[in-house]
Amino acid sequence: MKLKTLSIAMMTLAVPSLAAADELLQMQKDPNNWVMPAGNYNNQRYSELTQINKDNVKDLNMAWSFSTGVLRGHEGNSLVIGDTMYVHTPFPNIVYALDLNSDGAIKWKYEPKQNYDETVPVMCCDTVNRGLSYADGKIFLNQADTTLVALNAEDGKVVWSDKRDDAKRGATSTGAAFVFKDKVLVGISGGEFGVRGYVQAYDLDGNVKYKAYSTGPDDEMLVDPNKTTSMLKPVGKDSSLKTWQGDQWKIGGGTTWGWYSYDPDLNMFYYGSGNPSTWNPVQRPGDNKWSMSLWGRDLDTGMAKWVYQMTPHDEWDYDGINEVVLADQKVKGKMHKTAVHFDRNGFGYTMDRVTGELLVAEKYDPAVNWSNGVNLKTGLHDRVAKYSTARNGEDVNTSGVCPAALGSKDEQPSAYSPRTGLFYVPTNHVCMDYEPFEVEYVAGQPYVGATLSMYPAPGGTHLGNFIAWDAREGKIVWSNPERFSVWSGALATASDVVFYGTLEGYLKAVDAQTGRELWRFKTPSGVIGNVNTYKHDGKQYISVLSGVGGWAGIGMAIPSLENETDGLGAVGAYKSLSSWTNLGGVLSVFSL
Amino acid sequence: MKLKTLSIAMMTLAVPSLAAADELLQMQKDPNNWVMPAGNYNNQRYSELTQINKDNVKDLNMAWSFSTGVLRGHEGNSLVIGDTMYVHTPFPNIVYALDLNSDGAIKWKYEPKQNYDETVPVMCCDTVNRGLSYADGKIFLNQADTTLVALNAEDGKVVWSDKRDDAKRGATSTGAAFVFKDKVLVGISGGEFGVRGYVQAYDLDGNVKYKAYSTGPDDEMLVDPNKTTSMLKPVGKDSSLKTWQGDQWKIGGGTTWGWYSYDPDLNMFYYGSGNPSTWNPVQRPGDNKWSMSLWGRDLDTGMAKWVYQMTPHDEWDYDGINEVVLADQKVKGKMHKTAVHFDRNGFGYTMDRVTGELLVAEKYDPAVNWSNGVNLKTGLHDRVAKYSTARNGEDVNTSGVCPAALGSKDEQPSAYSPRTGLFYVPTNHVCMDYEPFEVEYVAGQPYVGATLSMYPAPGGTHLGNFIAWDAREGKIVWSNPERFSVWSGALATASDVVFYGTLEGYLKAVDAQTGRELWRFKTPSGVIGNVNTYKHDGKQYISVLSGVGGWAGIGMAIPSLENETDGLGAVGAYKSLSSWTNLGGVLSVFSL
Ligand SMILES: O=C(O)c1cc(C(=O)O)c2c(n1)C(=O)C(=O)c1cc(C(=O)O)[nH]c1-2
Ligand SMILES: O=C(O)c1cc(C(=O)O)c2c(n1)C(=O)C(=O)c1cc(C(=O)O)[nH]c1-2
């Protein structure tokens, strides 16, 4: 399972694995660095840096820029460690180490050899990759072809690599690898190809430690029927198996391609699972557990402590993979270690991350109409019958469902400021028509079974909002309409400035308290990357990848998609994007 | 020959052709605009704008940027007319009209359909295109497949188009179309495929007015044996034919892909012709006239007034196509209407552009060693025998020739400031080994017949210089060494600031008097585009295309070229470029 190319020379360079855990915990506290995808274990995308503030952010200028040489969608963000910045690209998944002492001159470049014809055609939503992780002198890259590779951070040489799955059956990777303490965690994509989701853990030397599926027998899910809870109660035996008809769970999705977080005190990690396969609900009666669920697992063993299914028996492709942000908040008078999650289904969930107790669940876009709300006792939705694509049945077009399949929010990660106590959430404001049809499973072939159109939510023409959310109350504090969905990850800083990018290509800075726009800059291409910040030589920098694409930009990424329903319905909704921007991956770095 | 798609509606929009001539003459005087490739008829790339000056240029910042969505080399520059900027790309030769009132939002986009497999493989030196021209409400694009197309400047619709040649025999286009008064002039590429060079003139409605070859019978060259002069004497009958063996002139090159200039008072236009084919001199005894020559022609009739061959019987691929800059200068005590030309062969020529008299010819890089100098009476070189690849013969490697085949300067255009009286010249500082071999002509196949390696000139490791040149004396005034060849076109402004880009991706501003660097900025990719400037809403902007490629960057543009001698020898010399930058076309716009 493991290809060891670790030379003696590299071993002497490498810090012993045991020290690495502490190393990351320390490193993320240094705001000069940005050492992991979200900047910190708790997924807050919050920086203590304050050199750039509300008064001077208007003077922000581009300091330098770097073309990645790759077109199509650029998600994720760079890492910054000392004098080096690490930048990744979508397929072919190049990694660059850039010299911050020399305007980003290239220290080394790693370009994997991957099979294009096998891999790219089975990537559902563009050839994106969500970035790199670091630990123990190594840069971890989760390649599209499901190879996890550890590169020597000094010279880019392969230290070890493991190809864990097979694109021929539709399994690919877009999510970052996440390093928590002494483990590297990777998920899998392929919910549109019937891939059964799982998370796999390695140690830092490339040995597989465990694998935990989202569906199937208890032992394969690392679920203890008596100890693993859902809504505070043990899940019981076969909690997944009995919610599926026959063997459907084997091709039942629940993939795991989102942003993971970690609480070092609880030694638990958190992530969500995606849609059940197929998108045609008629073909898979039952709750389809544990697709569409949030998971809290023990890092050492992988055992699930709790799980919560947000959308049982999904009828709209509301994948549950969006990030889980960890913050300590007072909810209904009581302090909780909370986990906050903005689900594709349009609800913002606040949970107790120790117990999995559901504390708050409210709509974070008023347009959401498929559910009247969540019962906090049962965790279940009060569904609106007319928007039930299962009830309306196959070959019936259910129209006007809000949100659309790409949710009130998709993978674009939110930020949290412990100073304001608010979450800053890039959102979609899109509705859809959804027509399920019968589809046969063929390994490696699309297993979607639904035709979609998407369009702006009623009463407006804009496709997105950037909002501030109070997760204690479940309330929108302010909301800035945006022409297109905000498909970029947000950044909050200790000077109460919040940054995000737009699909037209603007990088924007807004006031964390009021949402007032303080600054904007037109980067070369639409932004679906995540904003981050670092300090070098005493100067604070803001950095972001532009390069339009992703699901929203799929019509640009694949120009041959021309019908409104192409790209699983995204082509029509985002058609006018081509009047604003073009493909092209460029890292832009800003400073005062 | 002409595809008319001119609708009634468009005709009412279009300004009558007669008025167009005056229109351009006026428009180029307005420094807010940039209405033709070089900004003005005389190819000076000089702007009267002074808002950005020596003191404040250090505060220049990027205002906005625009990814073109195309990788590979981006030569040329944008046009600016009023509120609209027109940007072109390399193959597939997209044209964008950008709204300057809205950070470059796309007004319209034109993307021609061209046959990739027929065209791209026969482009010798990357898929570059050198830009657009404007007249009469139309934007003129000279496509790679040799189609000249006129687009309605308002909406990008095709007004007329004409495909004048055939890529199947190796004929392509990279040069801009040039509009002078009431004519559109286009040249041809393909000297590496035995294409016989010519310039073709259209009126603004797409009717072919004349075609003038570089080689062959007098009437096909539009040469009058009695009236056309060279070195002040009539060229006489069959001036070309008698310098070739047999029919070799038919496949003898002399292509015409450079920057043209025009003197409205003399009604003459100027340009150069390229290398004789093949690169193996042994196969084509004789002077090979009029390859490697400067031409002064009457615009109305195309008739040659004078012609001068800089490198008779070329042995090194010193194409004569580099720009001809028109300036009025006092040389040896007497005012002349001069034409100044920095030839690939390493000599800076100052000529009287009325008569074709040779006034000055001096080395503009001291490394030049193949010639000891030019006899101003005969116009001939004092050649150094040991660097003669013809004398050394086939299958002999002649080493240490300076300059290399890409010359002391290639297509990268210089700028001239009438204020300082100096020329600002982006140069190469590269030498070569050159081994000719016998090659058979097959239509559409490379007809090169030489193997090359290139490397820095002796005594240094740098591959370029940016110099200031006094063309009255033939002297370098100052010279800034650059790590790589300077493959970007220069801009001079009335505030005595000179701009140029570098292959690493820097845009630089230097003091016109001293060469002192005043400012630099790292753009996303290596710069082989030309810097220009315009004013919009009272603000001066500097704009430049980055996007590494061209001959120097061919190893980046085509990563499969891996041998040092690949890319006609450029791959080896510029190998380290990949440590500095990546492909990617981005327009960057700067202001104070
Ligand atoms: O079910 C899956 O395995 C899967 C994978 C991915 C992916 O890997 O990018 C996306 C989705 N689903 C998906 O539903 C979705 O909305 C989506 C958006 C994007 C994106 O990067 O813009 N990827 C994906
Ligand atoms: O002989 C020809 O027809 C021809 C064409 C071209 C071209 O069209 O780009 C170049 C050359 N030659 C050439 O010799 C050369 O050095 C060159 C450099 C470049 C460039 O764009 O970087 N093109 C060309």
Image (tube, coloured by chain):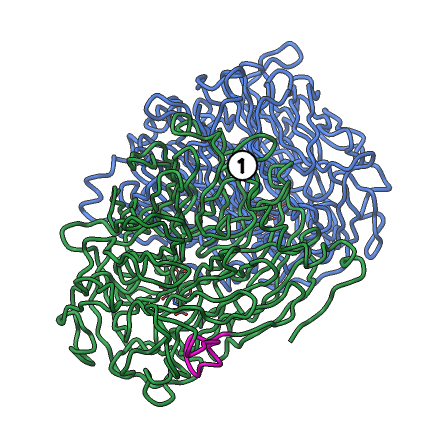
Chain colours: A green, B blue
Give the overall secondary structure of the magenta segment: loop
Q: Which residues are magenta?
A: A212-226
Where does the image place residue B22, in percent across and percent down from the top left? Answer: 33, 26
Q: Residues within 10 Å of mark 1 (few under 14, many from 20)?
A: many
Asked if residue B236 shows in the view, the reply is: no
| Magenta-span inclusion, residue A219 | yes
Whether residue B542 is situated above or below residue A328 in the rendered picture: above
For the residue pair B84 and A351, the one nearer the viewer reads as: A351
Which subunit holds the residue at mark 1?
A
Q: Which residue is mark 1?
A: A64
For the residue pair A331 and B155, the one nearer the viewer reads as: A331
Where does the image place residue A298, in percent across and percent down from the top left? Answer: 50, 66
Whether residue A42 is situated above or below residue B130 in the rendered picture: below
Q: Quadrant of the N terminus of chain B?
A: bottom left
* Disc 1 residue: CB within 8 Å of ligand 2: no
Give residue B313's quadrant in the image: top right
Residue lying farthest to the bottom in this orientation: A246
Please, what secondary structure does the residue beneath circle 1 have? strand
| Magenta-span inclusion, residue A202 | no
Residue lying farthest to the front in this orientation: A334
